[in-house]
Image: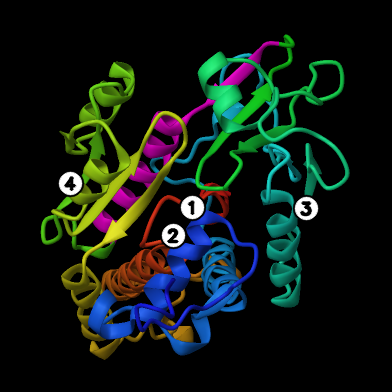
Amino acid sequence: GVKVLGGNPLDFGLLTTPQLHHCVRMSNGVKGSGPFWGKVEWEGEIGYYKMICEAYGDLVNKNKKESPQRRHSFSWFGIGPCQTDIPTQLYIDCSNGIGANKILKLQSSLLANNIQFNLEIRNDGLESGKLNFQCGAEHAQKLRLPPMNFSSKTDIGKRCCSLDGDVDRVVYHYFDTTGRWNLIDGDKMAALVALFLQDELIASGLFRRLTFSVVQTAYANGASTSFLSENEIKVVRSATGVKFLHHEALKYDIGVYFEANGHGTVLFRDSAVQTLLSRKHELVSVEEPVVKPLSPNRIPFFSSNRARRYSEEERLASAAQYARKRKILAVDRLLQIRQLVNQAVGDALSDILLAE
């Protein structure tokens, strides 16, 4: 049919729905996807993994350089009855769909970039299992029940998540120490992502220059709306349906939307990307203040070289140096988030990396 109409069909084989959207977006290039559409090397399925794995690697490596004592530094797994350290392995319910195959490819691509990502796949559907039967994001979110092959007898304290059949939705869940099953749905994921973005926008000095909002529908959890508002994050309403959420999010420089079922993403307008790039150039171009070591005759007799006292000028220079580096780090993170998160549609694979 495509050939009859004069088109050129491209067969990418088996893909997740978000991966197909990514391929279309990359194929459209500048004309269809704007000046910051991406790179030629990001085209196709292999390019998709390259794009998100590079961004995830940069984010993880930069996070290691910062103190964990951040304003919104918390984990859903460290509150309530759980009170455990964040588990190092992720247990993924693949809903007996295409997700199992793609998760393994994602893990291989991460390893190729020297990034360790420990996971265990369940409900893979590779040999048996019915699509979405007693498993998957829809089952977990709608029925408020753990998927099959997940049990309080074996999985207490483990970090788990469920994909849907075509991998455009993801919800997290876990069993606390009482054996109670807890769901982290799209509303909670939106809050988690929005708080992180707010932190980085403030740190970058762009919080007032870029418009930022979380888009919800009337079906969103009212407590999540109140939580976001209390944290001074703008929340706007749209009609129900992904197409309405997506279009409303595009009205802001940075728009976040997640349906309760786990379908969501973070959208960056081209003007926001340009502002971020300009801000980085501006910060990098500024001459870095020099912190000179104290001369021997300025060190008090009771001080050692390991416990030097700084003059007021040196303390200010050191503080300015740190502030500048933190702003650059924040801008880099925002640009990496934009590369990591699917700009075409909600994508469970990139959303997992974002949450991790």
Marks 1 and 3 sit apart, C-alpha to C-alpha, by: 20 Å
Q: Residue at x 36, y 67 (%)?
A: 326
Q: Residue 347 carries which label?
A: 1
On the question of residue 19 being in view, the answer is yes
Calculate the distance from the C-alpha at mark 3 to the C-alpha at mark 2. 20 Å
Residue indicated by mark 3 = 118
State the residue at coordinates (40%, 80%). 27
Nearer to us of marks 3 and 4 is: 4
C-alpha separation, residue under disc 1 versus residue under disc 2:
8 Å
Is 80 situated above or below 288? above
Q: Which quarter of the rendered picture does the N terminus lie within?
A: bottom left
Q: How far apart are marks 4 and 2 (CA)?
A: 17 Å
The residue tagged with tag 1: helix, strand or loop? loop
Residue highlighted by disc 4: 248
In which image quadrant can residue 16 be found? bottom right
Residue extent of the magenta highlight: 180-203
Asked whether, in this view, residue 36 is left or right of residue 52, the answer is: left
